[in-house]
Image (cartoon, rainbow, N blue to C red):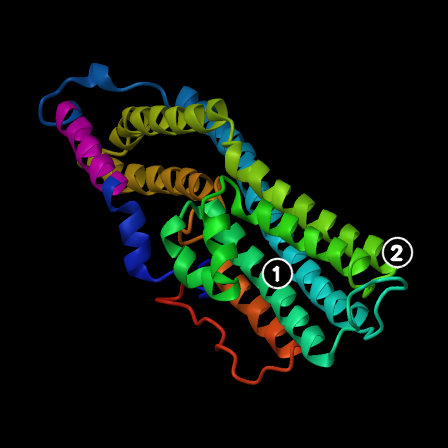
Amino acid sequence: MYIRENLRWHIIWKLGWKPVTVFTVYSLLVCVIYGPLGFHSVAIPWQPVATLGTAVAFYIGFKNNGSYDRFWEGRQLWGGIVNSSRTAAVQILEFITSVVDAPGSSMPPASAEELTSRHRRMVYRQIAWCNALRIHLRRQPEQWDTGVAPFLEEQESEYLRATANPPAQIVRQQAAELRRLREDRGLLNDFQHVTMMNTLETLYNLQGGCERIKNTPFPRQYAYFSMVFVYLFTALMPLGLVMEFAKLGPDHIWLTVPFSVLVSWVFATIETVGHNSENPFENNMNDVPMTAICRSIEIDLRQMLGETEVPAKLEPVEDILY
C-alpha cells in the first residue's frame, strides 16, 4: 500500500509513459495528415466525440467504484482478522487458567509450566494462521519457512505445508486442541469452549471473505469494455480536436497534440487506477499491506504472552508498505 501523501514523479512516469508516447505519436500523425498533407477528410465533428467522452467517463467511474469496493472490503476483512486474533489470544490466556483436572480424569492436574506451554503453542498457532492466510492469498508458498514454520512445531508444520488450504487446517488444529482441553484436561468449561469455537468460526468467515475476493475476478465484461471505450475515445479525440483548432488558424492545428495527449493521459490513468485496485491481494503497490498487518498481530500477541524481544514493525520500502 502506497502511504506517501503525493505520488513521486518517477511513479507517475512509470505508469504513464507508454500511453503518453502512443498518444503523442498518434496525435502528431493526425496533425501531419490534416495539415501538411492536406487530407481534411480525416477530421470529424467535435460534438460526437464530446458525447462519447462523457459516456466513457461515467462508465470508467462506475468500474472504478467497483474496484475500490473490492479493495476496501479486503482491508475491512483484514481489520477483522486483527481484532479476532487479539480476541483469540485473550481467550486463550484468560480461559485456559485452571490447574485442576476434570472430575474422573486419569490425567494429573495441569501445572503452571503446562499452561504456559499450551498458551504459547496456541497463540503462536494463531500467528501462524495469519501468516499462512497471507501466503495462501498471495500464492507464495516459498515464504512458508520464514512466515509460518517458526510458529509451529516441526511435525505440524510439515503436515500443514502439504495440505491444499493450510490456514483452514490450522484453525482445524486449534479446534482439536480446544476439544482436548475440555474433554481430557478439564481446562475449559462448556461456556468457554463454545465462546472460543465462535471465535474460530469468525476466523473462518474472515478467511472465506478474503478467498471470495481472491477467487472471484472482477467481472471481465466491465474491465475489458472499460479499456476498449477509453482507447476508442482517445483514438477519436485528435480527429475532433484538429478541426476545432484549425478554425483558429492553420498554425493552431499543432495545439491538438498537447491537449489531446493531456486528456488521453487523464482517461488512461483513471483506467489504470481502477485496474490496479481490482485484486487487493496481489502484493502490488496499492494492495492491502498484509505483511505489515501480520507483523503487527505478531507483536501484539507475543507481548500478550509476556515476551519482550519482539520484532519491530515493518517500515515502508520506497513509500510502499507490503
Considering only order in the chain, which callout, 2 or 1, is on the residue closer to the N terminus?
1
| Whole-percent x, y for residue 276 in the image | 43, 43
Q: For the magenta stretch, what is the residue range?
A: 19-33
**In the rendered image, which quarter is residue 79 located in?**
bottom right
* Label 1 Cα crowd, 10 Å radius (few <14 / some 14-19 / many 20+): many
User: Would residue 26 be seen by someone viewing this image from the given angle?
Assistant: yes
Would you name the residue on which mark 1 appears? 126
Q: Which mark is residue 190?
A: 2
| Whole-percent x, y for residue 30 in the image | 19, 27
Instruction: Relative to 276, say whether 221 is above or below.
Output: above
Q: Is residue 177 left or right of residue 13?
A: right
Residue at left offset 18%, top offset 30%: 31
The kind of secondary structure the magenta stretch mainly shows is: helix
Magenta highlight on residue 255: no
User: Would residue 65 be seen by someone viewing this image from the given angle?
Assistant: no
Magenta highlight on residue 29: yes
Q: Nearer the viewer, residue 77 or 144?
A: 144
Residue at left offset 66%, top offset 55%: 174
Q: Is residue 162 left or right of residue 126?
A: left
User: Is the C-beta separation of discs 1 and 2 under 8 Å?
Assistant: no
**In the rendered image, which quarter is residue 10 located in?**
bottom left
- Residue type at numbered disc 2: Asp
Q: Residue extending furthest bottom? A: 308
